[in-house]
Amino acid sequence: MSYGTPPPPPPSYGGAPYGQQQPQSTNGKAIAALVLGILGVFPCCSIFIFGILGIVFGSIAKKEIENSNGAQKGLGMAKWGLYLGIAGIVLAVLYWILYAVGAVHYNATFQKNS
């Protein structure tokens, strides 16, 4: 009694069928670059670290996305993180120059009115 050849296995859930592309994933460094770049341009975050990190993560993510041959997406986020990081550094430098000259005054003391 022969049953013949067994049926082929069902398609796996982890990969795309033969001949189709894998789904694209968003680069995590691109997301981080965008978030850090946005934080870098806010006046309350007038320290350079967010802008610097936005530039670093944006540059790395841009290179990784371009070298992934279409497997990763997020190039726009990486570029905007890079641009906003640069803008954040420029705004922070401008703020600190104006602060040093005396054009901007920041008073962190709170007084209670009685």
Image (spheres, rainbow, N blue to C red):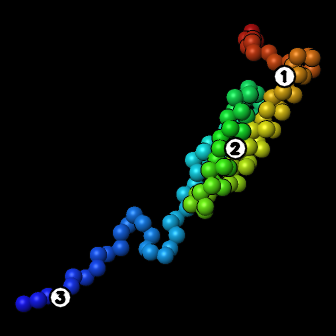
Q: CA distance from mark 2 to mark 1?
A: 26 Å
Quadrant including the C terminus:
top right
Q: Earlier in the sequence, mark 2 or mark 1?
A: 2
- Other-residue count near label 3 (Cα within 10 Å), few / some / many at <14 / 14–19 / ≥20: few
Q: Tag on residue 61? A: none
**Do the residues bearing badges 2 and 1 touch, measured as CB atoms within 8 Å?**
no
- Residue picked out by circle 1: 96
Of the pair 103 and 66, the residue shown nearer to us: 66
Q: Nearer the viewer, mark 2 or mark 1?
A: 2
Q: Is residue 2 left or right of residue 105?
A: left
Where does residue 56 sit, x and y in percent of width and height?
68, 38
Query: Judging from the image, what secondary structure is the residue with disc 2 in?
Result: helix
**Do the residues bearing badges 3 and 1 touch, measured as CB atoms within 8 Å?**
no
Q: Quadrant of residue 88?
A: top right
Q: Is residue 65 above or below residue 34?
A: below
Q: Amino acid at mark 3?
A: Gly
Query: Judging from the image, what secondary structure is the residue with disc 1 in?
Result: helix
Q: Residue at x 62, y 50 (%)?
A: 64
Q: Nearer the viewer, mark 3 or mark 2?
A: 3
**Whether residue 41 can be seen here:** no
Q: Residue at x 40, y 63 (%)?
A: 14
Where does residue 57 sit, x and y in percent of width and height?
65, 41
Q: Quadrant of residue 99?
A: top right
Q: Earlier in the sequence, mark 3 or mark 2?
A: 3
Q: Tag on residue 4? A: 3
Query: Judging from the image, what secondary structure is the residue with disc 3 in?
Result: loop
Q: Earlier in the sequence, mark 3 or mark 1?
A: 3
Q: Is residue 23 left or right of residue 13?
A: right
